[in-house]
Image: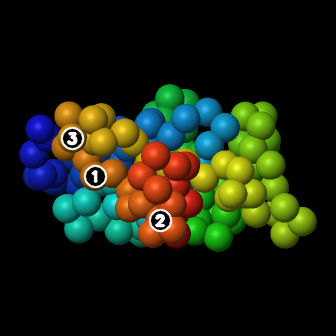
Amino acid sequence: MTQSPRDEHDYFERIYTATEQVPWGKVATYGDIAAMVGDGCDARVVGHALGALGARSATVPWQRIINRTGGISLTGHGQRERLEAEGVTFDERGHVNMDAHHWSGPSEEWARANGFQTLPRAPDKPASAQLRLF
């Protein structure tokens, strides 16, 4: 199991690892990634980490991380285009159709093996159903 981050670099690496789990054609919120990382991580820290990707933005799928309402950040240059290329659809407000594209989170097995948290399950859904989060 992964230990708690010792410094900002370790914290950011955990955020990047969590982000890399979001599959093609799906999105997660900054809060989802923070919940997976745990250890006091919050949505702002996730935003800072993704903003600090630099050259790694070519390999970490930053475009799949959006705000809790399905909106794209103001600095997400090319984010919508990248998501549309993955089949992600948007509503008339320009927000991701969350019902269709919101990722339910990592499997319990992956999370446990890698020292991450699963995402909370919606109270009105059985454990085996697709999750609708935040």
State the SS at label 1.
loop
Percent position (x, y) of residue 18? 38, 43
Q: Residue at x 66, y 37 (%)?
A: 25
Decide if residue 26 is on the left or right side of residue 110.
right
Residue 117, label in figure: 1
Q: Amino acid at mark 1?
A: Gln
Which of the two marks, 1 or 2, is nearer to us in this view? Answer: 2
Mark 1 vs 3: CB contact within 8 A: no
Q: Residue furthest front?
A: 126
Residue 125, label in figure: none
Q: Amino acid at mark 3?
A: Arg
Whether residue 58 is situated above or below residue 62 in the rendered picture = above
**Who is closer to the viewer here, 98 or 18?**
98
Which residue in the protein does label 2 denote? 122
Task: Give the Cα separation between the discs numbered 3 and 2.
Answer: 20 Å
Decide if residue 60 is on the left or right side of residue 81.
left
**Who is closer to the viewer here, 16 or 118?**
118
Residue neighbourhood size for the residue with mark 3, other residues' Cα within 10 Å, grouped as few (<14), some (14–19), many (≥20) = some
Q: Residue furthest right?
A: 92
**Who is closer to the viewer here, 51 or 23?**
23
Q: Residue at x 30, y 35 (%)?
A: 110
State the SS at label 3.
helix
Visible residue check, residue 94 = yes
Decide if residue 99 is on the left or right side of residue 133.
right
Which residue in the protein does label 3 denote? 112
Percent position (x, y) of residue 51? 48, 54
Nearer-N-terminus badge (3/2):
3
Q: Amino acid at mark 2?
A: Ala
